[in-house]
Amino acid sequence: PRWTKMELCPEKSSRARKFGTIKDDNWVRPPLEQCSMEDFMFDFMRFHHKQGRDWEIVWSAIDRVMIRTGKPMDCLHFYKQVCALGGFKNRNHAKQSFRIMNVFEQLFNYYDNHTLTDIGNRCLTVYEDFFLDYEIENEEDRSYGRCSLCYGGIYQGTKHMAGVLHTCISCEKFYHKHCQPMHRFASCINKGCFAGVPMMFVCNACVLTADKELTKLDEEMRLKSWEDSGTYYVRLYELVARRGRRYNAS
């Protein structure tokens, strides 16, 4: 099939082309840490289409999980956060390795004093039904490794500290957010769409080298983080508008 002919393809929209990287039918999704929402949703729905499923029905079923929030499902950050915690693998592993409610609390769908009493089980079920096969197909999306400072990993319950691991773009070492000075991270980290999501940053040791190019790159990444955070849902609604079946949040 000509994937670039799908209405969902970022090439079909001038706004999406700004963030998407698709050029032809041989396109391969970028690594997850570099993946835009447009690229991810296209690749995610293309995967389901290849499995013989109607991708629009799949997307509608996923959105229904968050129907009471009045917003489409924040799929990219839902998937990225689970992968950042080592992956779902299976339901029992997920329940033992992390709290799915912590993942939900970091999505754009979350709001204070919500009444979604069964959202934990809903999130586990929707991931198991629609995201797990994609995770298995893209095993490299799962985050592994140890923090270079405390030697803790991504899992809860270890004798070392645990949490999402962030990667230094200079030395390529892993660090927990709480193992680095807070000012090393963009101020939007752990807020909105960046909560619980691994990011690239410049670690304190590398900054102390006083490399001007590195300092400039660090500033550019912070500005980009703000831009992505501020426009994310505008872009998602624009993407939803190009589906053949109209999204209804009522």
Image: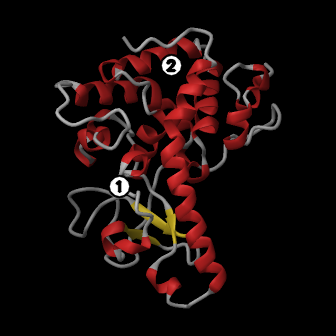
**Residue 19 vertical position relative to residue 239 in the rendered view, above or below:** below
Number of residue marks: 2
Identify the residue position indicated by label 2 in the image.
59
Q: Residue at x 25, y 68 (%)?
A: 161
Q: Position of residue 9 (x, y in %)?
A: 70, 27
Give the residue type that dot 2 points to: Trp
> Is the N terminus in the top left, top right, bottom left or bottom right quadrant?
top right
Give the residue type that dot 1 points to: Asn
Residue 138: numbered disc? none
In this view, the residue in front, 117 or 29, is 117
Sequence order check: which comes first, mark 2 or mark 1?
A: 2
Q: Residue at x 26, y 35 (%)?
A: 111
The Cα–Cα distance between marks 2 and 1, rounded to whole angstroms, is: 26 Å
Q: Quadrant of residue 223?
A: bottom right
Q: Residue at x 83, y 34 (%)?
A: 24
Q: Residue at x 41, y 23 (%)?
A: 129
Q: Which element carries disc 1, helix, strand or loop?
A: loop
Q: Which element carries disc 2, helix, strand or loop?
A: helix
**Residue 205 vertical position relative to residue 195 in the rendered view, above or below:** below
In this view, the residue in front, 80 or 243, is 243
Label 2 or label 1, whichever lies nearer to me, is 1
Q: Position of residue 91 (x, y in %)?
A: 30, 33
Q: Position of residue 142 (x, y in %)?
A: 47, 50
> Is the C terminus in the top left, top right, bottom left or bottom right quadrant?
top left
Q: Is residue 55 left or right of residue 68?
A: right
Residue 190: numbered disc? 1
Q: Quadrant of residue 146?
A: bottom left
Q: Position of residue 56 (x, y in %)?
A: 56, 14
